[in-house]
Image (tube, rainbow, N blue to C red):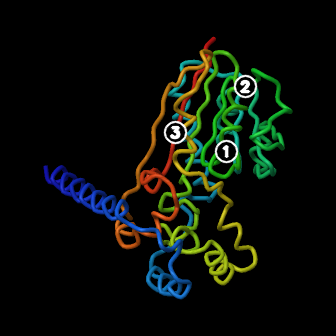
Amino acid sequence: MLNQLKNNISNKLFRYNYKKAKQAFDKAIPFRNYLPESEFEKFVQQYSNVAAGPRQDYSLAGMEALALERFQYIANKINFKPASALEIGPGAGFVLKKFKENGINKAVALDIVDSLYPEVKKAGVEIVLSSADNMACIPDKSYDLIVSWSALEHIPNPRMVYDECLRILKPGGYLYLHFGPLYYSPWGYHHYSVLNCPYLHLLFPEQLIHNHARKIKGEDYKGYLPWTNGCDLDEYQFLKKGLSYEYILESYNSGYDMYSVSMISRYPEIFKSKNVSFESFFVDWIQVGIIRKP
């Protein structure tokens, strides 16, 4: 009962803050694109006591645990046992390792670099070095299952990736994409290992973030700021419409992050200057599932 009361109060507060930010955004005149550079150090000082770090456990045990969770999720979602699976942007490759351990014949990782761990390759996972937006090396209707987590926001042409996935999916096969944080959401620049401040990349020029990252992380700082495609929410609308008769949209979900909405109320003119929909500042991730008809 107490938890329900707390949730109700929290939800009402979120709705109030959201409405307040929306009103400020609608009335704002976009007279500037960023805060003055002199303000950046104030943000550094303000957020320096907030722990900064990756949102994922990259220890071996952590990657194995996440891989098992993802494997079980997909296994429970589909009603067939795939003979072949392709993962786009697999990172270390432990999800595909789980598929191999559970009897899949062919598990293939596709990426522009080979980051597979030795134990993943030893399990029989293959690697194809290719950009996901042009998989010409893969014939039509090649895979029963295509999956991807946290990759599409890092690829320049997500629509082309989507079209390529549909092309190489076998009849009766399943495509699962889950990606984020999206660029205009609070953590869309993936800067949480540098400074744990929401919307930092929208408030200041990206170069300031890079300069700060270099200062605290050294010359290898770019590993803490993975490149993102800068797409806003509307640029992913193709995921919800336009499928040909061969395919069925099995699921479409998105997640909201409204914990930092007060930042929009404080600087509405800066957010207005981005020329994107208000919703783009809140939709944190997108998940889509597609079935190709047999």
Determine which residue is flagged by label 2: 167
Give the residue type at disc 2.
Arg
Q: What distance separates the C-alpha of mark 3 from that of mark 2?
A: 19 Å
Query: Which label was assigned to residue 94?
Result: 1
- At x 84%, y 44%, the residue is 129
Residue 153: image location, x then y, percent: 62, 50
The answer to which image quadrant residue 172 occupies is top right
Q: What distance separates the C-alpha of mark 2 from that of mark 1?
A: 25 Å
Q: Quadrant of the C terminus?
A: top right
Mark closer to the chain start, 2 or 1:
1
Query: Which label was assigned to residue 287?
Result: 3
**Element carrying mark 2:** helix
Left or right: 238 as drawn, with respect to 21: right
Residue 272: image location, x then y, percent: 45, 63
Give the residue type at disc 1.
Phe
**Element carrying mark 3:** strand
Of residue 53 and residue 26, the one placed in the foreground of this image is 26
Left or right: 205 as drawn, with respect to 279: right
Give the residue type at disc 3.
Gln
Mark closer to the chain start, 3 or 1:
1
| Neighbourhood count class around disc 3 (C-alpha, 10 Å): few under 14, some 14–19, many 20 upward | some
Left or right: 90 as drawn, with respect to 21: right
User: Is residue 200 shown above or below 63?
Assistant: below
